[in-house]
Image (cartoon, grey):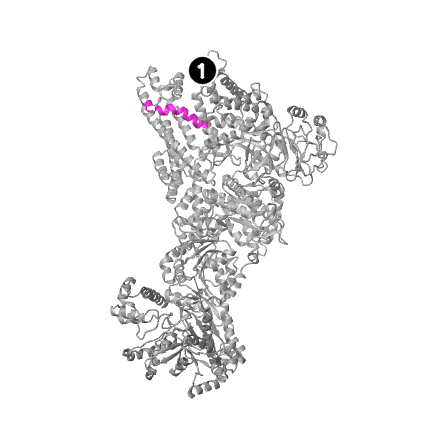
Amino acid sequence: MRPQLRLLSISSGRRRSCGAKLVSKLARIRARKYPLRFCSAEESRNFTRCYPHSLRRRAAKQLSSERNMPPFICLQDRPCQAFAAMSNTEEVVFIPAISLGKCPLLVSRMANILEGNGSEVAHSTELPAEIKDWDKNHVRDWILRFSDVDDEYANILFDQEITGSSLLLLEKAELIDLNIKLGPAKLIIHRRDELIKLKAQQSVSRGNQSSKSCKPYPFSQYHAAYRYQENSILDVIETGALNLIEPCHEYKAFINFQNVTTEEKLKKFTEEVIRFAAACMNSRTNGTIHFGVGDRPDFTHGQILGTKIEDKETYNQKLADVIEGRFEYKHINVVKKCIKPPRFVEVLEADMTVSGKYVIEVDIEPSSLLCEESFFHVYSVDTRKSKKQSKTRDLKTDEKDSTKLFYIRDNSSSRNLLVQASSTKSLEEYYKYVDNIVRLSQLRKEAEEKHLTVAKNSVQGSRLCEMITGGSRSLDKSHFERYVLVTNKSHPVQKEYLAFLLDMNLTAVLDFDPESAETGLNKLFDEKRNINVHLPVQYKITEPVEEIASKLKLTRTTSWVFCNGGIKDEKPSDVDNWLLEKGSSIRDVVSFLCRKDVLPHKKFLVMFLLLSDVTDKHDPMLETFSMFVQELKGTEQILCICGSERLYIHWKELIEARYGVNISGRCIYELSFAEINGTLLSLWSENRKSSRFLPGGCGKVLLPRKVEGRLDALSILCVNQCEGGNEDKKQLEESFYKGGKVSWWNFYFSEQPGSMPFIKRDKFDYIINTIIPDVCSLTQACVRINILHLPGCGGTTLAMHVLWTLKEKFRCVVLKGKAADYDNVAQQVVTLLTHETIDQQTWLPVLLMLDNVDEFDAVNDLQQLIEKECQRANALSKSPQVILLNCMREESLLQTEATGDTVFIGNRLSETEQKLFEKKLEEIEKTYKNAETFYGFMILKKDFSPEYIQGVVKNTLKSFDFEQKYARLFAVLVLLDCYCKSATLSVSVCEEFLGLATRPDSKSYKAEDGFGKFSTLLTRCTEESSVVFEAVRVIHSSMAKHCLEELTTTFNVSKAKITDFLLTTDLFYDCIQGKEKLMQDVHSMLVKRNYSAESLPAECQFSPLIQAITKETPGFEEHILLNAAKRFKKDAVIFQLLSRYYYLRKKDFREAKDWVKKARDLQRHSSYICDTSAQIIKHELKDAISNDKDDPIKPEKMKEYLKMAVSAIEAFSETQEIARKEAIVRYKGKKDFTPYNTAGHLGELQIAVIVTNILEKIPVFSLDELQCNILTQVLSRDMNIKDVAEKDPKRLRHTSYYHFLQGFEELLYNLKDNTKKQFDLLESYYVNLGSFYFQKDNRELRTRQEVFKCFQQYAKLFYKSDSKEPVRNKMVTKMLKIKKAHQYLEKNHADSYSGLLARLSDEASVANIEQIVERYIFLFENTSSQDDGHFKDTVNIIYAHIVLSRVSPESQKLWAYTKLLQVLIDTLKHPSPLSESLPLYFISVVMLWPETTDMFSGGNLNDRFDKLGSYISQMRHCFSEEMKPICIGKRAVVHFYLGKKTGYKRLITQKDIDECVGSEQSMATHLQNEMIWNNEKVSNILHRVSGRICDSAILVDTPNENGKVKVYPMFKSQLKGKLGDRVSFFVGFTMNGPVALGIDSVTRSKSSSRFTISWTNSWEIDLLLTRIKADVGFTDDLPTEEETLENVNEGADQITSETLIPLPRNLHYQVEPTPASSLMMAASRPTGLHQEVHSFLSYSSVTLGLGFHGSLSQDLEQEFPLVMTRPCALGQLSRGAKCLDGKTTGEKSAT
């Protein structure tokens, strides 16, 4: 912007005193290069004479613009009003002076005119820097600078003696009070405030500038990764020519363009560039002129300011244009090559964010080759414009305007040697300089030759390869398992050279670029890879380290830490404030990452990637470097990569100056990023660099690394797995044969030419060719295949072999780790399923391998979650979408036969397998010299020969010494392997314990080597825990078992000794990698019990390890458990374990109570721990009774025992309440499917039995049978204690007993009722609820056995009935008979619907069930609706008959089905008690299902149908109230299936299905995968129902359209299709409503236009339809109705699909029901009729039945313009059809 000079008035009194200062200011102005031109008074007078007053302003501006001259100053001898009016112009400024006689002094004083902001003028008096130091003269001078404020207002403040201090306090109102008008008053206050703000900013800026220096942008470059930071200082000064190659510099602030046009701004830019460029070219020196860089006095010399740029291209265009007009024509091409295009360098804020400003730089490079011996003049104006104007102007004027200028660099400025009116002396200097051009050009050429770039022979490329891999020189096999990246702000030009980072195993990235997500490295990674963005605060240790690592997903997905804001509205900090504001949180990050339990010690590398300058001693990168050095105790794990040597020098010097550390040996700086990128990419194998592909429906699809990164819970097997890899075949095979886990490489190598194929186990072909095709034919979304195997038998290898073989047919994956979040796993599996698929037809199923998951329950949970996720994502199809290949260890040696979805791998090879192993052994012995150590292979080959294993163990352990460190560690590994599946020790733990010198390079010792000779029994593996780490384990479980036996028998090292050493060695649990996994394994080893079916109850009390220690070294187990409590200081389960030990083994109930109290303090709301509290009281009570030798029990003891019993009942009741709350939480969460804890209910039953035993041992109730009956009456509330006492002839002797018993009346009177409630609840729970996947639960079986024992005791006491039949004993009253009948029913578990339903699966005798039915008939006939229990008995009599009908269909005791149905209908008319609603509605739905309504008649038929939906709804509501949430982890059991027959025979039980299918195990398998519904025998006895899909359910076809019945599928994932699609299915009846099973879609045939009307009985009638032509009506002869019926009755078996005649697609048929008589006639000959439903023309078939109205779907109405309106008989279609246009097509009838 041009300087805008204002009128200056100098009083004569101050003239002399200002002279010296004004001269000084002139020098400053000249230094700032402001183009001021002084002219004489004569010149100014000529101007005023030429132009009248009104045109002077316009003329002045025009003259300056045309001549392209700087503003000139005219000195006048007196103030002129006309000139003053023109003084506001920016182009020409007239300054009145006082006296021409003193012109030199006045010229000097003109130097005081400074550039301002348009309103201020520098006064002759310098103002103090601080406003508070101003006197009243300073204040007046300051105001006089404002052209828009009258001078009189300055004098007013002067008169009021306003100083700087008072100016700061001045208010606007006070100025107005001084008669200063509002406008000037506001301006004065505003400018004061702006001045205060400016000085504050300058103060901060100058305070920061002392430490912020920066280098200029590299000369003659345009793509360097370089930016400036605002207010930093360029460390070069403005100079003249140096060595001609080193550029000289010139700075221009180039700011304050608020009121300036773009054209004027560009003009300022080009003027300065032309002048500077000419000077550099004539001086033959390189140079750079900087716009946006400040200079003194307003700024620090070289201060980066930056300037706003609207359009960068205009600068380039304008400069090129001006060059053509200002230089001589002959030099234009040379000049354009010497003057480089403008470079726009971005300016960042202090906090490293974008400011929106740039520094514009223009480089001048006058090379000798271009300039040769030329010299360059510059025209003062654009010669092209002057030529155009020459026609209107005289030649003399034109020549004057076109003055030539000749600039050279003179120190820090550009000087013109051809100044106007040049003196002879100056012309001599010009000619002398021109004559010297030849010599100057030669100097330039010599300088260029001297500075030619010499190619460096650097070794840093090799050093980089060595340092970044730890010496392996391959990133695939790098010594460093993990990398941590620390980086700062990147530049866009760098991104293409940072690709090497994308494939590195980056655990964390510490990013100091606050704009990284928008424009930086984070954006690059986010586009290509999966990352997790974190704030530093998330690394703060506020919970266990393992949990934090798990939440951050460290070692699974790169953690991107924004270290200086840029995320979640966190503001960045500048260099000076970063350490205070963010330093502590970054230290938390560094400390966390350097922990030994997070990343492997000495096996991760911290890379400092310097993408931009680090020049400040407080830079965050420098602070972070210091943190890492402190945490890692040195720099050997740090690598610094600098983009240039300049960056390196700054970095190195700052580190040396601040920390005294020489970092040069850990830095790479001689390579460009392009070279670094290429070098590091070359360290990857082709396999790692190549793309990965998944199988697709019609080919292959790309699996981007970003997508694969998101699926971090899955290890994906691609179709091109291992291709292009460089793995060591020999090493991998050796590891596998020794006992290591198989890898994909083993399969890959076996397929290469010259290799022997991988051994195929016998079960391999069975799985591939039989099981997988079978399960793929199912309709469930997620199905399962089980491979059960003994440890070390090759089960995992077989499963992976199956995946490898099928990797092109399925999307194969392996689940990483066993502790994964299954909800997340399910989402990832479905994501993989749908990746890059257009529609469901192109989906390939996911084959998901689960390796050694501990429990079937976990597999079931995952299967459920995957099904739910498939349904949520609408990933449903007619075949399975996900197949679980569950590879699970089976400890039992009993080999089971293969079933439809399960195979067992035992420890015996077949003959075929033996031959393959023999052949493989021959190949191994030829290749490997150490084949004798391939124990994993040999154990399997020798069929687990104990002799072979024992021989190896004895030979290997013969020098075992437990005092040796490595021997102890080996013993720990053996113990862990024997008592905890998949237990390992991390390599870090082993290295730390053995004291191996771990180094950050490949020269470190291997952990296995530290075990000496025992290393042959160990192998390495990778553990997928909260963090991924390398671990060591025993090669084979059988080897570990024999090793442990050998240690015990030969070396006297007991299990207790090893366990104690494991628990008391602190190093295992210190801050070290793998600690969490070890603690989990140790915890499991101590706590987890074995509930196998073969084990005795006593063997299930504690874990196998504790049981073994107790057996081997009795008494030591207590010491072990106490040490476990010390190790697990806040573990409630360990405390619970100790409590259980004390009350079960030691009978120390006081100690047990102390430990359980500690456990409950930690887990107050655990039902299992609460149950332990109750169990202590129960066992204490049992122990006291058993130790009581008194017979009978004394009164005081009785009181004590009953008091304990009350406490126990209260504790068990609390357990029940907590268990219910737990179940509610799990039910709402829908992720944890752990079944309801029934221990509290069983405990209460056991206490009730103990109480009755106590009462039977006191004399009041124990003398004889009569007394015992009295006890029964008391507990049944038929007598009270007081009545018993009064009738007792020995009441005086028994006074104490009665006294104490009265204190427990509540216990005694409620005992029977409460016990009965518990029995009923458990019976309902076990009968109505079953496992999700129909698997047996051994713990549940044991509980049911205990419940049965309790019931036997209960029945023995309360149900002592006469042996004769009560109904035949005429001596007994009716009331007693009724009571005896009820007692009989209760005794036989037949007094409830659940007890009756249990008889369907029990081996109950027919006689027993008939007796039950007899008693119910008696009760039904001898009680009325007013009697208690009559309603329940009426409902139960229906159940009893149905059960009897299924056990003995020919029994004479059975009522007719119609009679039973009538009883049900009558019962439904009465209000039902809430307790009986569920069984009533269940049996109503079963018996009133539409297909059997032809068994009775009545006018209320439609009412029954209408209410069926209501009954189902109420049944579900009752089930929810009664069974939820205790049904968590369970599925409602199907009690009946809908069969094809009628009456009792239509109800099919599970036993009927079992008989069709076969073995019980096979039955469970079939039900789980729904294979059963494809069984021919099953489909022959079950009836298939049809309906339409509606809201995740099926709307069943019913005879009455108003009777809507919804059926939900048992497996929701089996419901495929869209809303409204028709399906058929089998119906199962559960207490939670009917369920659909074996769902099958009803599809139309593409090859035919036929359809079938099918009857919903046990057979279907294919209706003969003839061709109908819509355009001409019905033309063919059709049979009559009689002929049709005759055909149905006599020849229907001859109907074939060929006789079905196609129908036109433009007809809509509406079929009404046939008369009942016709139906009965048709039903009389079902033999030979078609059994299958045919669906041809329509989108669905039409289903008919008695009273049923069916029609084709409404979807066909648009295709069928004819609407048949008349009702028809059987198969009769009305010929009286009416077209939509009103025309009639005919009158005949058609069949």
- 1096 inside magenta stretch: no
Horizontally, residue 1645 falls left or right of residue 1159, namely right
Q: Residues within 10 Å of mark 1 (few under 14, many from 20)?
A: few
Task: Tell me the magenta residue range.
Answer: 1300-1320
Q: Quadrant of residue 1462?
A: top right
Q: Give the quarter of the figure containing the N terminus.
A: bottom left
Is residue 247 in sight in this rendering? no
Nearest to the observer: residue 325 or residue 229: 325
Asked if residue 142 is positioned above or below residue 1072 in the image, the reply reads below
Residue 1320, percent from left and from top: 46, 27
Q: Give the quarter of the figure containing the C terminus.
A: top right
Residue 80, percent from left and from top: 35, 78
Q: Quadrant of residue 146?
A: bottom left
Is residue 1137 in sight in this rendering? yes
Q: Which residue is identified by label 1?
A: 1376
Outermost residue on the top side: it is: 1371
Q: Secondary structure at mark 1?
A: helix
Nearest to the observer: residue 1760 or residue 949: 1760
- 1304 inside magenta stretch: yes
Tell me which secondary structure the magenta stretch mostly adopts.
helix
Residue 64, percent from left and from top: 44, 76
Asked if residue 1593 is positioned above or below residue 936 in the image, the reply reads above
Nearest to the observer: residue 483 or residue 1182: 483
User: What amino acid is found at the position of numbered circle 1 in the picture?
Assistant: Leu
Q: How many marks?
A: 1
Residue 924, percent from left and from top: 59, 51
Nearest to the observer: residue 246 or residue 745: 246
